[in-house]
Amino acid sequence: MSPTSSSTLLSVVVTASLLAGGCAGTETGNPTLPAVELRVTAFSDDFGAVAVARPGTNVSVMRAFAALSEVQLLPCGAGLPPQRFAAVSVELTQKPAFQLDAAGTDQRYCGARVALAPSAAATPPELAGLSVYLEGTRADGTAFKIASAAPVTVDLRTTPPNTPFSAEGLLLGFNFATWLEGVDLDGATVEGASITLDASHNTDALAVFEAQAGLAPALYDDADGNGQLAGDNQPPTAGP
């Protein structure tokens, strides 16, 4: 074979190899986007008024559950699809924080929508038919429980409006200092050494709790992925 023929054959082989590699794709050329992780938790920005998941000097919320019927991240541009998470019942007081997962995306968002609604398939059994259930104690140690079937839908927006944020490292936090503000547990009727707020007991106090529900959730940055706020004064990424 002549030198010219050898050179031509080598060129064909190299070209074929490069084309084959291009068809297969590479990690650099076709990166896999990481899954979106949204952690969900309860907290209090005023532990003097309401402590969460530990004893406090006033009201303590020890266990709290919510039936999340809808959680979406809302894109900035009109006509773009939201990032949806599956409906789920969540123990807000569990550690580590409950985590919702969705397919990876490189889209940026400007808000979120959170809805709570009764679920027949909820866990634990106490949450069946309810949107929210919680247990705790008031300052004198009297136990209380709150059971609400009221549906709640909250739109969370950035400040200033339409400020984009990434879907990576987010925390959906429910502030129980806000949620329980004005709820008269001290004036509630005690039956059998405990207090119940539900559709049949202490309904006035329950109505205040349900009226506050739309102010409780907000979206926060969770850059370190530990499911906790950086501090009580951390501003929300998107709020009600």
Image (spheres, rainbow, N blue to C red):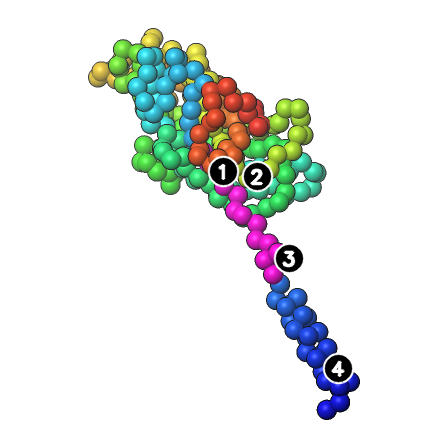
Dominant secondary structure of the residues highlighted in magenta in the image: loop
Q: Which quarter of the figure has residue 16?
A: bottom right
Q: CA distance from mark 3 to mark 2?
A: 22 Å
Residue under the point 47% across and 22% down: 231
Secondary structure of the residue carrying numbered label 1: strand
Kind of residue sitting beneath label 4: Thr
Q: Which quarter of the figure has residue 130?
A: top left
Comes first in the chain, label 4 or label 2? 4
Residue 117 visible? The answer is no
Comes first in the chain, label 1 or label 4? 4
Q: Are marks 1 and 2 in contact (CB under 8 Å)?
A: yes
Q: Are marks 3 and 4 in contact (CB under 8 Å)?
A: no
Discs 1/4, front:
4
Q: Which quarter of the figure has residue 14?
A: bottom right
Kind of residue sitting beneath label 3: Gly
Residue under numbered circle 1: 38
Between 190 and 75, the residue placed more toward the observer is: 75
Comes first in the chain, label 3 or label 1? 3
Q: CA distance from mark 4 to mark 2?
A: 51 Å
Residue under numbered circle 3: 29
Q: CA distance from mark 3 to mark 4?
A: 29 Å
> Residue 166 at x, y = what percent?
60, 37
